[in-house]
Amino acid sequence: MAILVLGGAGYIGSHTALALLNAGRDVVVADSLKTGFRAAVPPAARFYQGDIRDRCFCDSLFEREQIDGVIHFAASSLVGESMSVPLRYYDNNLGGTRVLLESMTAHGVRDIVFSSSAAVYGEPERVPISETDRTLPTNCYGDTKLAIERMMKWTASAHGLRYVALRYFNACGAQPGGRMGEAHDPETHLIPLLLQVANGRREQVFIFGDDYPTPDGTCIRDYVHVCDLARAHILALDYLAAGGESGAFNLGSGAGFSVLQVLEEARRVTGYSIPAQIRPRRAGDPARLVASADRARAALGWVPEYGDLRVILQTAWDWHHTHPDGYGE
Ligand code: UFG
């Protein structure tokens, strides 16, 4: 029996596919390659190219392969873009998942681990954020993730689907060894942008706002290493297989770092000065996002291993430094 990783050519998907293979699982990867990279898919995984909005494609995966669990990363994931083309996000994220769940239900595949986001919370009422806190997304991307969680909930009660939604905070870092890492086009995330400046690919980085109600005035985020996220997906599959109850789990380190702290650490790790300029706030950025991951710790036994910002940045730098053009496709 195999695990199907949808979106397994993307950043978190490819790291999860590798972690599954390293744990001795049989892995099938499917990806449209619209934003993912074929070269990111571990060679030991069987690969299919296609779009989950295509019911025939989903059916063919379940017919050709013996799938006993699905990990679903296949979605558009740029917050800014989701605000300018919202209907594309509803189509791809919500529409794609609807087709996937129909196909899973028709083929008797019961367990799904879904890639959700801290974006489901919007502006938090308090930090650290718990799963039971208010969910009120402030962007379309987060709204699609929350709607998918609800879609899974109702499909669970009607058709016996069993799901875990993993709400990631700020995914970062790379597989130690520098052969696999983060590559987006366009790049919008803080850490890869800082490292692109260090690499000479950009002149400087802009800091979006220094007038937030935080100690240094810049936004605070909970940076969680991609390998810790990958491991959480395997634990979530095992939890479902053992009869664990469906639900949502935060994945964060529980520690918050400001934009300026990340900049300083990136300067130390790379040895480059990384010029930075203060700019106005970016629309929709909450001042502080920090997870309580107590539920994931208690139910899944998940404890992040890469809590140290320096180690996170070092693994990301090992990748960016040796792959300045990402996967070069
Ligand atoms: N930032 C800058 N300059 C940049 C890029 C980012 O100052 O050039 C700041 C942002 O304002 C933010 C912090 O760095 O305060 C982190 O920004 P990222 O874009 O790296 O990440 P976000 O916190 O905006 O987004 C993350 C995930 C999203 C998820 C969101 C939940 O990447 O998928 O958290 O709010 F939706």
Image (cartoon, helix red, strand yellow):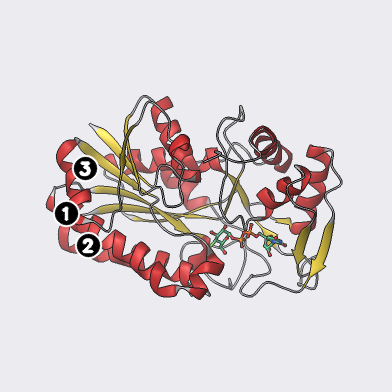
Tag shown at residue 155? 2
Residue 50 x/y as whole percent: 30, 48
Visible residue check, residue 133: no
Q: Earlier in the sequence, mark 3 or mark 1?
A: 3
Q: Are marks 2 and 1 in contact (CB under 8 Å)?
A: yes
Q: Residues within 10 Å of mark 3 (few under 14, many from 20)?
A: some
Q: Earlier in the sequence, mark 2 or mark 1?
A: 1
The residue nearer to you, when weighing 239 against 220, is 220
Q: Which image quadrant for residue 128? A: bottom right
Image quarter hosting the N terminus: top left
The residue nearer to you, when weighing 313 against 80, is 80
Residue 136 x/y as whole percent: 48, 75
Asked which secondary structure carries label 3, the reply is helix
Asked whether, in this view, residue 60 is left or right of residue 283, the answer is left
Asked whether, in this view, residue 126 is left or right of residue 271, the answer is left
Instruction: Kindly identify the amino acid type of the residue bearing the numbered disc 2.
Output: Thr
Question: Residue farthest to the front?
Answer: 329
Q: Please determine whether, in this image, residue 256 is positioned above or below residue 217.
A: above
Q: Which residue is mark 1?
A: 105
Q: Which image quadrant for residue 23? A: top left
Q: For the residues marked 3 and 1, what is the alpha-carbon distance in whole angstroms?
A: 13 Å
Q: Which residue is mark 3?
A: 61
